[in-house]
Image (spheres, grey):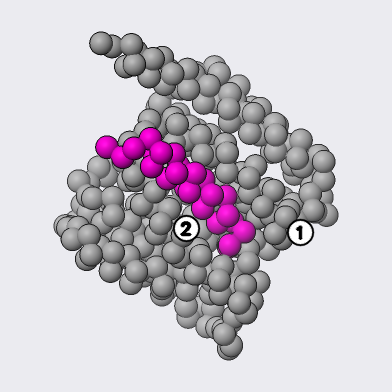
Amino acid sequence: MPSKANIVSTYALLVFIWATTPLAIVWSVSDLHLMWALVLRFFIALPLAIVLLLILKVKFPTDQNSWHSYLAGSFSLMGSQIFTYIATSYLSSGIIALMFGLAPIMAGLIGRFGFKQSLSRLQWLGMLIAVAGLAIICFGGENQHVNPIGIGLMLLSVFTYALSIFWVKKVNANIDPVAQATGSIFVSTVAAICIVPFIWQYAPTHIPNAKSLFALLYAVVMASLIAMFCYFKLVQNIQATTLSLTTVMTPMIALFIGAILNNESLSAMVFVGAFILLFGLFVYFYRDLQASRKLAHKIKSKP
């Protein structure tokens, strides 16, 4: 098992990558058509993922059930990201990150109404608080790159992402996480190829500027590959509730990164709404956090 320092550094790196990825997406479309930025991201990611698969000597299953799982996983990549990239025309990077913080709540709703999973009163309260915070952001961010159309697109993105998680679990294929990620990237790349004829007229006619090119490569290497390894490493070594707290931490960090590096000016009302939304997420996770603490205390108290 990795040392505590190793786990902490991995956790910090994952939070940093997820907090900076929305800004990387926004920068990547600054000198590229947004759909081409998305398509190129998968065109570059696929060969890198295959190389890593070969280096790590991970088996890549090709049976029908595995392909079903790859298809389900692709909805968290191409299926979700297509809405995110379109939303860059309407939202700042910080707000995009904040919207992704709603993923656990969206997953809770899908679990409740789609799979008959129960939710506690505290979780319902957390959802209501988060929605109230989202409403404040929408009404308090007028003329400040906070557009209701972008909010709607990000809700679709988060819904597709959360639905993909349930779909992959329902398929329940016995696949190594690295193989699952590679297969999902492959399916997403096939979908990207299908998009190309419709965006060919917007094909790049020059090499993108340094900022756009750097952001594109960052989204591929850091967000698509390194973050994947950090995530699965943490899944194997820490509790799920501890890992899920990244959704509370990353949005606020992303808001400050966007303000500092991209001059994203946001009103006080937007920050109030962001705080309320994040507080709602904390309330949503509160019971799980309490249970995790009790379990950790019991483990430590055993002789």
Q: Nearer the viewer, residue 203 or 240?
A: 240
Q: Label 1 amino acid?
A: Asn
Is most of the magenta stretch helix, strand or loop?
A: helix
Where is residue 86? Give x, y as percent.
61, 62
- Report the label total: 2
Residue 184: image x %, image y %? 34, 59
Residue 8 highlighted magenta (yes or no): yes
Determine which residue is flagged by label 1: 263
Question: Which sits in the foreground, 32 or 236?
Answer: 236
Q: Residue 235's quadrant in the figure?
A: top left
The quarter of the displayed image where residue 125 is located: top right
Q: Secondary structure at mark 1?
A: loop
Query: What label sits on residue 223 in the rendered view?
Result: 2
- Distance Cα–Cα, label 2 vs label 1: 22 Å
Mark 2: which amino acid? Ala
Q: Position of residue 243 (x, y in %)?
A: 44, 36
Image quadrant in which the C terminus is located: top left
Question: Over which residues does the magenta segment extend?
Answer: 1-25
Q: Nearer the viewer, residue 134 or 256?
A: 256
Mark 1 is surrounded, within 10 Å at the Cα level, by few (under 14), some (14 to 19) or many (20 or more) other residues, namely few
Q: Which residue is depicted at the point 57% across and 85% down? A: 207
Please name the residue shown 63% across and 49% down the image. Answer: 254
The quadrant where residue 301 appears: top left
Q: Position of residue 99 (x, y in %)?
A: 61, 45
